[in-house]
């Protein structure tokens, strides 16, 4: 990743997918079609609505909060390019229905959240956390969700 994205030893896992540099209220970045108003994540350069297929989209911050739609626990280490800690620790992923956009986005559940406390329909919010350290010792940051 370009050095210009480094912030105090941190870099985003995916440039342009969430607000950077980090702030107290991070957000995913999506696209909104100016013709039909539909939202998309990850960001795109055209409308993915087959009834529209407009070419005029804008990058917009998406809702930081939403409802837990579903979740699962990953007990098996996924293949590369996922970088798993050693030893591998199971982790939860969740699909969140964003408040304003009413679209579902997926992300890991934040560290320290007891998965037994998760309830479908509960309010969740987006946070940034370290996914792993790269070969240069920088923290590679990713979005996750935690209960509000």
Image: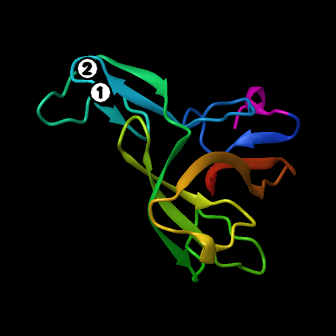
Q: Does residue 32 appear left or right of residue 25 in this picture?
A: left
Name the element at disc 1. loop
Tell which circle, 1 or 2, labels the residue nearer the N-terminal end: 1
Residue underneath mark 2: 55
Q: How is the image coloured?
A: rainbow
Q: Which percent across, then down, holds residue 84?
A: 69, 70
Q: Residue at x 45, y 60 (%)?
A: 121
Image coordinates of residue 130 in percent, x first then y, are 76, 53
Task: Left or right? Give the position of 143 relative to 137.
Answer: left
**Relative image position of residue 109 (x, y in whole percent):** 61, 62
Q: Nearer the viewer, residue 47 or 23?
A: 23
Q: Which mark is residue 46?
A: 1
Q: Which residues are magenta?
A: 1-7
Residue 12, placed above or below residue 85 = above
Residue drawn where x is 68% and y is 59% of the image: 110
148 drawn magenta = no
The reply to whether discs 1 and 2 touch (Cβ–Cβ < 8 Å) is yes
131 above or below 79? above
Name the element at disc 2: loop
Between 44 and 103, the one nearer to me in the picture? 103
Image-quadrant location for residue 6: top right
Q: At x 45% / y 66%, what residue is drawn? A: 120
Q: CA distance from mark 1 to mark 2?
A: 5 Å
Mark 1: few/some/many CA within 10 Å (<14, 14-19, 20+): some
């Amino acid at each position: 990743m370009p050095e210009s994205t480094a912030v105090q030893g941190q870099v985003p896992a995916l440039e342009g997918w969430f607000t950077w540099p980090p702030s107290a209220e991070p957000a995913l970045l999506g696209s909104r079609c100016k013709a039909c108003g539909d939202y998309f994540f990850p960001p795109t350069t055209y409308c993915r609505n087959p009834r529209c297929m407009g070419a005029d989209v804008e990058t917009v911050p998406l809702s930081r909060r939403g409802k837990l739609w579903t979740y699962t626990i990953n007990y098996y280490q996924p293949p590369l390019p996922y970088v798993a800690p050693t030893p591998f620790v199971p982790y939860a992923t969740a699909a969140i229905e964003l408040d304003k956009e009413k679209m579902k986005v997926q992300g890991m559940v934040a560290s320290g959240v007891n998965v037994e406390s998760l309830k479908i329909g509960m309010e969740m919010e987006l946070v940034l956390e370290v996914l792993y350290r790269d070969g240069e010792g920088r923290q590679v940051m990713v979005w996750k969700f935690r209960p509000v």
